[in-house]
Amino acid sequence: MSFSALGLRAELLLAVGEQGYTEPTPIQAQAIPAVLAGRDLMGGAQTGTGKTAGFVLPILQRLAEQQGGTHSRTQVRALILVPTRELAAQVQASVFTYGKHLPKIRSLSVYGGVGFHPQVQALKRGIDILVATPGRLLDHLSQRTVDLSKVQVLVLDEADRMLDMGFIPDIRKILAYIPKQRQNLLFSATFSDEIKKLADGFMKDPLLVEVARRNATAELIAQRICPVDREKKKDLLAHLITTGDWKQVLVFTRTKHGANNLAEKLVKSGIRADAIHGNKSQPARTRALAEFKAGKIKVLVATDIAARGLDIDELPHVVNFELPHVANDYVHRIGRTGRAGSTGEAVSLVCVDELGLLRDIERLIKREIKKDIVPGFEVDPRIRAEPIVQGKRGGQQQRRPSNSARKPAGNRGQNAPRQPAARAGGRNSRDSGRRAFSY
């Protein structure tokens, strides 16, 4: 099937062709006709399979076909909500790229960490498509600098991530500003029961489109586990990068402090690296990402805030320096590689503390990940697990002695993960403090 068979306008087909795309991905082939027909839709697919184009292209077509084209003050016709700043910028870039041959379609992304006043000025000039993070959009609504009374299409992108980050109450507040008669689209790489419950609350007979089983990882991604002692992880990472002559590597840590520390260690080892996380200013995050894409730095160390929204052409390597507490995040992390038909490699450095997390991931993706022991970095069987206590999302995790009587820290604050704290020893953690590394 070609894009021309989907009923898209010539201007959109031209823009798609200029990007080198000739055939739609499975999610695009099913979602685009449904959106053009005006259906509410829940679209799920593996990350990196073109979900963004699946809703951007038909929205652009719908707005372009409407008569008039005048822009009332700050009135928005399509609203796209996303969880992170990076994803907001990425989606708005896709809107611009695919809509550049269409006249009078204006778009804007608004998010925190940057100046408020320039966004106000842009909104005053009139915006057709607004891409926003929930918090910054509520700021604009409270200041009455944006008008959502003419919204015709609402998109929730990466809805499961917004659930994890505690944005659902904000989304419900935003829904009160939008006309009830509208088209609703919900896109996500994974669907949980909570997401389906959310959809039931505001969507009307949505069409469910899933082109891969829930929580699947892309087949083009080669996954492997490198067992290693916790204190040797940094040295092993540097070894893999240098001996493998890796040119571009995205590395994930659990914490902001850990990301900074690892980037500094790599720089001291002669490897060009930088860190990106929530404590960095938006200009610093944008600069680091731009330098990474341009090849000026070899390694970008990120927290899970970057697991969604980083779209890097043909990224060859993703490394989990630490496994995520939430198994779903593993799918999104490694989904930064193996995108748009390209192959990629995902390597996870796993110490004894993380065996429970590894089992949760393998249970989620319904496959055992290949183990690859790197010579010189074999694990010491005498080292025992130190259970990880999960604190606030993005904060620094702490380890507690195995004989501690304290319970693991729970969720603190509305932005904490909704899952309970992970247990290093798996489902039954009574002997977690005595467990050595074994499979």
Image (cartoon, helix red, strand yellow):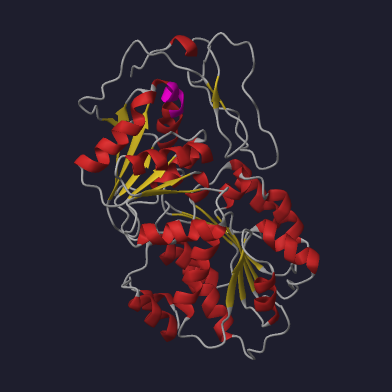
Give the image quarter of residue 438.
top left
Q: Is residue 348 above or below residue 107?
A: above
Residue in the picture at 26% in, 42% down: 241
Image quarter (top left, top right, bottom left or bottom right) of the N terminus: bottom left
Q: Is residue 424 above or below residue 431?
A: below
Residue 424 locus on image (x, y percent): 48, 21
Between 101 and 184, the one nearer to me in the picture: 101
Number of callouts: 0
Image quarter (top left, top right, bottom left or bottom right) of the C terminus: top left
Indicate left or right for 86 with 244 as reference.
right
Residue at the bottom extreme, as displayed = 68
Does residue 359 show up magenta in the picture? no
Between 324 and 340, the one nearer to me in the picture: 324
Q: Is residue 369 visible?
A: no
The kind of secondary structure the magenta stretch mainly shows is: helix
Q: Is residue 235 above or below residue 272?
A: above
Indicate left or right for 260 with 395 as reference.
left
Q: Which residues are magenta?
A: 353-357
Residue 217 locus on image (x, y percent): 38, 45
Residue in the picture at 54% in, 13% down: 401
Residue 2 locus on image (x, y percent): 33, 73
Residue at the front extreme, as displayed = 268
Residue 304 locus on image (x, y percent): 50, 44
Q: Is residue 48 visible?
A: yes
Residue in the picture at 70% in, 41% down: 414
Q: Is residue 357 above or below residue 400?
A: below
